[in-house]
């Protein structure tokens, strides 16, 4: 155990090296590394005075603000565990997480006061609550009332640092325990792929309560000594304004943001003030190739990635391969060992695993320092996911070509069988992404008396388009085996998604 293994000490070391460099830019202020470190030390003192000790959970239900990052690093300094919580959760959903994780402290947005009060009502061990923002900022008062506490508790690399609940694309979310070593090596992976340095300014509009915003963008940027530019709400015009105003070198966003970003980019008078922008990064779902072309023709390069809460970023596709390998999520990151294991073997012992052949569908498994240490209070789920020899089953199906590029086929549980043939919805959806009338699509299997299951496609149509099921089926038959073509098409106004843009297929029928 060592204080060097505690990622909570990064800000103190950064302050000593480059204390005057801008660390965080938010709406009302800019904090340099010295100021961010001091505020984090005050936050640590407040948490300690509030009874937080090693292993305790500190819940954070905040928008993208400096207080979020300060609390994550402050909790780590105490050997405690930061618990990011989605600010969009309804009281019953919030209560479910609070009951499961039992945090000692809950820091939340002032505007969530009523929702939080309803969530904790009747809880015997309700957490100490503190509101940030608003007219009377209790968080600012709390840290101002405590002298900086520079102590950093020694930890093991495998000690938990963050408890992050999965985004729930298939049902009830689970809390993934993410250790200090994962935060370190994930930051190293990001530094290598993004070529991160202290010269960068990284705009983060993706919520910090998700792995994308926190573990892929903000924390790696601070590790590298870069500037994190925080936006609390997505507005395409304001994003481009922030890129220009703060000399942003790259930003991250989910695919659903990029159509709005393209329209807002075209509405700008000139793009000379975007000269510092090196690229944009997207993850969470596939991005149509025509959008890649559109941004590149306007001088904006797109990098893409794929990962999950349990691992953070797993694969990355560089901008130079975006067109040539359209549909792929790229190659494995530097600090990860990835295999595609034949589906008929992956449920058995690791010693019996067999790699899928080139181009053959299998399940992605991964091992290395970027994996979680287990699910909170879920021993069976942990045992099912974390296998012998350090391998983690992702539940994602994919193929890998001769060059090592990985292409997602879908979630293992999304696959359905039609007339004895396996159908992977992601393959079907990819074929329809090129259709001019289709803006978004989600394919699910539904019962069929003859075939067992057949595909049903829920389609968000392009502006001005009308649903023509016969034409859509004909389009599919030209590009897919007949058994893969959806039997029915349903027009919907929107598809239910997580904040990171992943479609929640388990909610589609429930929402109709």
Image (spheres, rainbow, N blue to C red):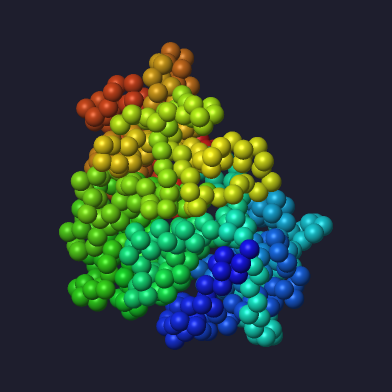
Q: Is residue 373 visible?
A: yes
Judged from this view, the residue extending furthest toward the left is 297
* Quarter where residue 495 is shown: top left
Quadrant into which the N terminus falls: bottom right
- Residue at image location 33% in from the left, 29% down from the top: 357
What residue lies at 75% left-to-right and 73% top-to-bottom? 50
Image spot of residue 472 (x, y percent): 28, 31
Q: In this view, which residue lies farthest toward the top?
A: 450
Q: Would you say residue 470 is visible in this rendering?
A: no
Q: Nearer the viewer, residue 132 or 382?
A: 382
Vertical side of 261 occupied by 386: above or below? above
Frontmost residue, 11 versus 92: 11
Residue 45 or 404: which is nearer the viewer?
A: 404
343, above or below 381, in the image = above
Q: Quadrant of residue 400?
A: top left
- Most extreme residue toward the front, as rendered? 1
**Left or right: where does residue 296 sit relative to residue 182?**
left
Residue 323 in the image: x percent, y percent?
21, 48
Compared to 36, does 236 lie above or below? above
């Amino acid at each position: 155990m060592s204080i060097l293994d505690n990622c909570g000490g990064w800000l103190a070391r950064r302050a000593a090296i480059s204390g005057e460099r801008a660390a965080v830019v938010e709406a009302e202020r800019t904090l340099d590394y010295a100021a961010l470190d001091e505020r984090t030390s005050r936050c640590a003192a407040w948490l300690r005075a509030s009874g937080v000790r090693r292993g305790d959970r500190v819940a954070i239900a905040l928008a993208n603000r400096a207080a979020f990052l300060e609390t994550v690093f402050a909790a780590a300094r105490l050997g405690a565990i930061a618990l990011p919580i989605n600010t969009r959760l309804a009281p019953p959903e919030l209560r479910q997480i609070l009951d499961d994780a039992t945090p000692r402290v809950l820091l939340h947005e002032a505007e969530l006061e009523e929702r939080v009060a309803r969530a904790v009502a009747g809880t015997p061990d309700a957490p100490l609550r503190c509101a940030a923002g608003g007219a009377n900022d209790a968080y600012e008062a709390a840290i101002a009332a405590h002298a900086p506490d520079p102590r950093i508790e020694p930890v093991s690399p495998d000690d938990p640092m963050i408890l992050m609940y999965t985004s729930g694309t298939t049902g009830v979310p689970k809390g993934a325990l993410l250790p200090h070593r994962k935060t370190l090596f994930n930051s190293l992976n990001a530094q290598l792929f993004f070529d991160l340095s202290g010269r960068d300014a990284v705009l983060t509009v993706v919520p910090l309560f998700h792995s994308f915003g926190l573990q892929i963008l903000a924390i790696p940027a601070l590790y590298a000594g870069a500037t994190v530019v925080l936006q609390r709400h997505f507005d395409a015009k304001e994003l481009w304004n922030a890129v220009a105003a703060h000399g942003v070198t790259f930003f991250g966003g989910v695919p659903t943001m990029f159509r709005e970003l393209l329209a807002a980019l075209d509405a700008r008078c000139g793009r000379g003030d975007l000269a510092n922008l090196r690229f944009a990064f997207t993850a969470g779902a596939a991005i149509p190739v025509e959008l890649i072309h559109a941004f590149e023709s306007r001088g904006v390069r797109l990098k893409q990635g794929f990962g999950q809460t349990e691992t953070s970023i797993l694969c990355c596709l560089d901008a130079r391969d975006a067109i040539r390998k359209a549909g792929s999520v790229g190659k494995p990151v530097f600090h990860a060992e990835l295999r595609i294991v034949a589906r008929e073997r992956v449920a058995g012992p690791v010693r019996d695993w067999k790699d899928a052949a080139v181009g053959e569908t299998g399940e992605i498994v991964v091992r290395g320092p970027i994996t979680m240490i287990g699910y909170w209070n879920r021993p069976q789920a942990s045992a099912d996911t974390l296998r012998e020899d350090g391998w983690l089953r992702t539940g994602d199906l994919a193929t890998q070509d001769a060059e090592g590029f990985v292409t997602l086929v879908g979630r293992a549980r999304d696959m359905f069988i039609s007339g004895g043939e396996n159908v992977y919805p992601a393959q079907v959806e990819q074929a329809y992404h090129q259709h001019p009338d289709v803006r978004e699509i989600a394919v699910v299997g539904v019962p069929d008396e003859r075939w067992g299951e057949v595909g049903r496609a829920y389609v968000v149509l392009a502006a001005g388009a009308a649903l023509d099921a016969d034409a859509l089926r004909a389009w599919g038959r030209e590009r897919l085996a007949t058994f893969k073509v959806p039997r029915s098409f349903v027009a919907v106004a929107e598809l239910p998604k997580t904040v990171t843009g992943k479609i929640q297929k388990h909610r589609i029928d429930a929402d109709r």
